[in-house]
Amino acid sequence: MPVLLITRSPSVHDSVVPLCAAAGVGAEVCAEPSLSLAAWREADLVLVGDDLAADLAELAPPRRAGVHVVGVGVGDAAFRHAVELGAASVVDLPAGAGWLSDELADVGERASPGRLVGVVGGAGGAGATTLACALAQWHAARASTLVVDADPLGPGLDRLLGMEDLPGVRWEALAETAGRLGARALREGVPRRDHLGVLTWSGLRRRLDLTAARRVLPAAVLGHDLVVVDLARQGGPLLAELVDRCDDLLVVTPATVPGLAAAARLVADLGRDGRAGLVLRPGSLSDADAQRVTGLPVVAAVADQRGVAASVDRGLGPLASRGPLARVARALLADAA
């Protein structure tokens, strides 16, 4: 379902539905907040009328990207309810019709949004960044892929992939701009090699801007078949929000007592339910031990692979040859499909 419109207001209905028709996307109109929850996750875009935003917020639907509160002459209460819903914006019609038309055009560009996979280290030095790059490289050999650097203290994903000299927009530029970010503009603007794009920083002083991240991720999944986000372990509330936006979360940790203890604390802080799993690096503990300590299922185990560091140093990325890393990337993405 491309668009879910939740409203009982005739003015909201008559303002939004023609815009959907003009963009060539279908819209399902739901006048009952409780019934809208069945389609909440499946819709490419969710538009919540300001007349029902308070009622829907009381139901506490799960956080997701692509939610906007819409109304005709919206009041201050709409902004408060938008925060409660985790909505990206409040659109006041008819003034915001042009912005909404562009957003709908992005929805029409894809049959459905791409998948958003988050990768985070359960312990320091576990290899989460290497796995994120490997997933992106494997999928980019087949379809449009974006890998997003959300760890300001990391090495820089462009360097791991040998793409640091390619032109394109970085986080700094996106943080300095405001307004709507289109899926096509993002896809064509980031440094790109064939089907693989990368979004990271250009300098040493790095900070992840939450407002920019909220604009980027919805555009990213509309413009790519797969988006992989390399998450920072010490992200606090920002990490929790980014994790909420992920379809799948992979927690990478060594199968050791310190590694699993650190991963358990991270998982407890995130409170992630559902599509989350452990990717184990070599250690002395078993899969059963790992699941018992962290509460997450083990979805893959990555053995040490010779030559990965040398491959990265040559600018080829971690997935330059067949081996355990390529097999795990293929299996994980097949499971996430």
Image (cartoon, grey):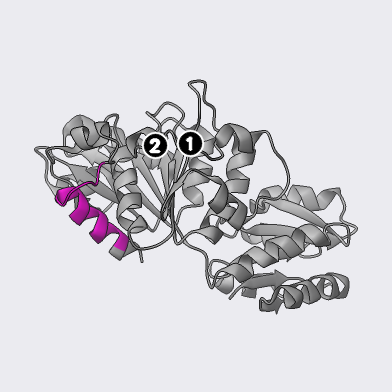
Q: Residue furthest left?
A: 284
Q: Give the mark, 1 or 2, whose residue is nearer the N terminus.
A: 2
Write the residue at 81% across / 64% down: 51
Image quadrant in which the N terminus is located: bottom right
Q: Measured from the top left, where is residue 249 in percent x and y? A: 38, 51
Type of amino acid under label 1: Thr
Residue 121 in sight: no
Q: Residue at x 48, y 21 (%)?
A: 204
At x 50%, y 50%, the residue is: 244
Q: Please name the residue shown 70% across and 38% down the image.
A: 177
Residue 145 figure quarter: bottom left
Q: Which residue lies under the disc numbered 1?
A: 200
> Horizontal placement of 4 versus 202: left or right?
right
Q: Nearer the viewer, residue 246 or 110?
A: 110
Task: Give percent across and percent down for residue 240.
Answer: 49, 42
Q: Could you say whether the residue bearing mark 1 is in a helix, strand or loop?
A: loop
Q: Position of residue 315 (x, y in %)?
A: 30, 36
331 is within the stretch colored magenta:
yes
- Where is 337 relative to 272, above or below? below
**Does 46 sit above or below residue 83?**
below
Would residue 318 be visible to someone looking at this image?
Answer: yes
Circle 2 residues within 10 Å: few <14, some 14–19, many ≥20? many
Which region is colored magenta?
318-333
